[in-house]
Image (spheres, grey):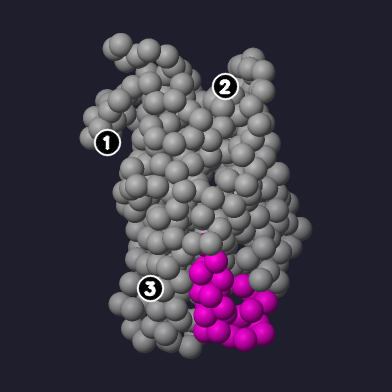
């Protein structure tokens, strides 16, 4: 059962301008990358490349996203969130343009892989949620993290039909150019998020260098368990994001249901993220996370074994949407509880790097195994097994601050 945690009384007013702008940035950065699967078939048909080529580009994107997140998180902690977010818009726009004009797999991998990945990394949940954490009271964090995650979910909901509509109306090339232009609004939206780790309402009661904070975290058992479990989240969701449209086509279901499915995942992701923020504020976050991962494994098992029809695709999308990014608010809140907010961008980024290693493997293995065996079944079943593993490792995580010498007050 989920253990009840009594919420504290919330009296501080929320900084709504920071929250709204941060949520809009999360929507913008998460939207296009979640719609990359719609570009796979039309791009490959014109270029003559195979699915491994596209899958590798998306895998590199996820790996660059993961590698960049702790680095950009540390930079935002020290030099300010706005500077890092402004860089995000520029890199993201450049990557989408290079992806559109790519004449070789190498350019595709640099543009759609490295640059888009770094663009997402520097505007990722870790950067935005760390800024939120520094500007809200501790008892409000889970709720506000749910808002930020829901905004990213809204990006998936909006960009699934938008990207498919742009491809249908203008072709995949112009669709990428249009989305590239959209990314240039991010530096403007980022202006209210100007602070760094020394600003905001949360006092820093324990001084550490970035290296000291990282060593402390990597020696903490609960942090390592949390990091290993988040690997599974990345594997599962990245595989579906990149390969589900092609999978739907392979099993003979009309392509429109792939659009509907990803839009439904995005919509119910909003509900799931908000619910996760609410639940995480009141109940044990590690146990809640264990149930999310176990629920994903049960859902995928049922989807693969039952007859696959448009109806089962829709039901799968709805339930998966509820479980999709519901891991993000409790995961980031646990990092803040364990170590405070001084280095939250970096430490949350390290956890997210594990997520993106999983994403890399999920996307790449999806294309690789399909090209070798003509089926995605092996990746589906691997995701089921990993979900059970994630449930197991989250169960013993301790939801409490790390014990430190001479700590004047807990955050």
How many residues crowd around disc 3 within 10 Å: few (fewer than 14), some, or many (20 or more)? many
In percent of the image, x 40 and y 37: which residue is there?
A: 197
In percent of the image, x 25 and y 32: which residue is there?
A: 209
> First in sequence: mark 3 or mark 2?
3
Residue 284: assigned label = 2
- Residue 231 on the magenta span: no
Q: Quadrant of residue 343?
A: top left
The span from disc 1 to disc 3 (Cα, nearest Å) is 30 Å
- Residue 165 on the magenta span: yes
Secondary element at tag 1: helix
Label 1 or label 2, whichever lies nearer to me, is 1
Q: Which residues are magenta?
A: 163-186
The span from disc 3 to disc 2 (Cα, nearest Å) is 41 Å
Q: Are marks 1 and 3 in contact (CB under 8 Å)?
A: no
Q: How far across and down, in percent of the image, does residue 44 sit?
A: 47, 81
Label 1 or label 3, whichever lies nearer to me, is 1
Chief secondary structure of the magenta portion: helix
How many residues crowd around disc 2 within 10 Å: few (fewer than 14), some, or many (20 or more)? many
- State whether residue 133 is above or below residue 401: below
Q: Is residue 312 left or right of residue 205?
A: right
Q: Residue 320 or 154: which is nearer the viewer?
A: 154
> First in sequence: mark 1 or mark 2?
1
> First in sequence: mark 1 or mark 3?
3
How many residues crowd around disc 1 within 10 Å: few (fewer than 14), some, or many (20 or more)? some
Q: How far across and down, in percent of the image, does residue 278 sit?
A: 67, 31
Residue linked to disc 3: 111
Q: Quadrant of the N terminus?
A: top right
In percent of the image, x 52 and y 80: which residue is there?
A: 177
């Amino acid at each position: 059962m989920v253990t009840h945690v009594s919420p504290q009384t919330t009296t501080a007013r929320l900084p709504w301008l920071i929250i709204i702008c941060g949520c809009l940035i999360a929507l913008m950065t998460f939207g296009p990358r979640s719609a990359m699967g719609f570009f796979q078939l039309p791009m490959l048909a014109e270029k003559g490349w195979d699915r491994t080529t596209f899958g590798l580009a998306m895998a590199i994107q996820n790996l660059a996203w993961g590698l960049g997140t702790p680095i950009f998180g540390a930079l935002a902690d020290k030099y300010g969130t706005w500077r890092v977010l402004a860089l995000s818009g520029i890199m993201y726009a450049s990557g989408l343009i290079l992806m559109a004009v790519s004449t070789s797999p190498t350019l595709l991998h640099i543009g759609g892989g490295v640059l888009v990945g770094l663009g997402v990394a520097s505007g990722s949940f870790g950067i935005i949620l760390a800024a939120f954490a520094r500007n809200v009271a501790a008892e409000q964090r889970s709720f506000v993290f749910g808002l930020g995650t829901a905004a990213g979910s809204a990006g998936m909901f909006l960009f699934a039909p938008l990207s498919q509509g742009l491809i249908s109306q203008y072709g995949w090339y112009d669709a990428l150019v249009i989305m590239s232009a959209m990314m240039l609004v991010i530096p403007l939206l980022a202006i209210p998020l100007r602070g760094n780790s020394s600003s905001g309402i949360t006092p820093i009661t324990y001084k550490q260098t970035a290296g000291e904070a990282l060593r402390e975290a990597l020696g903490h058992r609960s942090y390592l368990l949390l990091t290993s479990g988040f690997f599974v989240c990345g594997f599962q969701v990245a595989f579906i994001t990149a390969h589900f449209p092609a999978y739907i086509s392979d099993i003979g279901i009309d392509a429109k249901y792939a659009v509907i499915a990803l839009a439904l995942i995005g919509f119910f992701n909003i509900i799931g993220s908000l619910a996760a923020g609410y639940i995480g504020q009141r109940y044990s976050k590690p146990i809640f996370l264990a149930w999310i991962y176990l629920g994903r494994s049960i859902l995928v098992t049922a989807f693969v074994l039952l007859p696959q029809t448009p109806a089962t695709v829709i039901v799968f999308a709805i339930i998966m949407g509820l479980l999709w990014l519901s891991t993000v608010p409790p995961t980031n809140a646990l990092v803040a509880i364990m170590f405070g907010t001084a280095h939250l961008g970096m430490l949350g980024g390290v956890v997210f790097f594990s997520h993106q290693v999983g994403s890399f493997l999920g996307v790449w293995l999806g294309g690789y195994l399909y090209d070798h065996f003509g089926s995605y079944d092996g990746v589906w079943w691997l995701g089921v097994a990993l979900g059970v593993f994630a449930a197991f490792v989250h169960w013993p995580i301790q939801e409490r601050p790390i014990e430190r010498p001479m700590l004047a007050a807990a955050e």
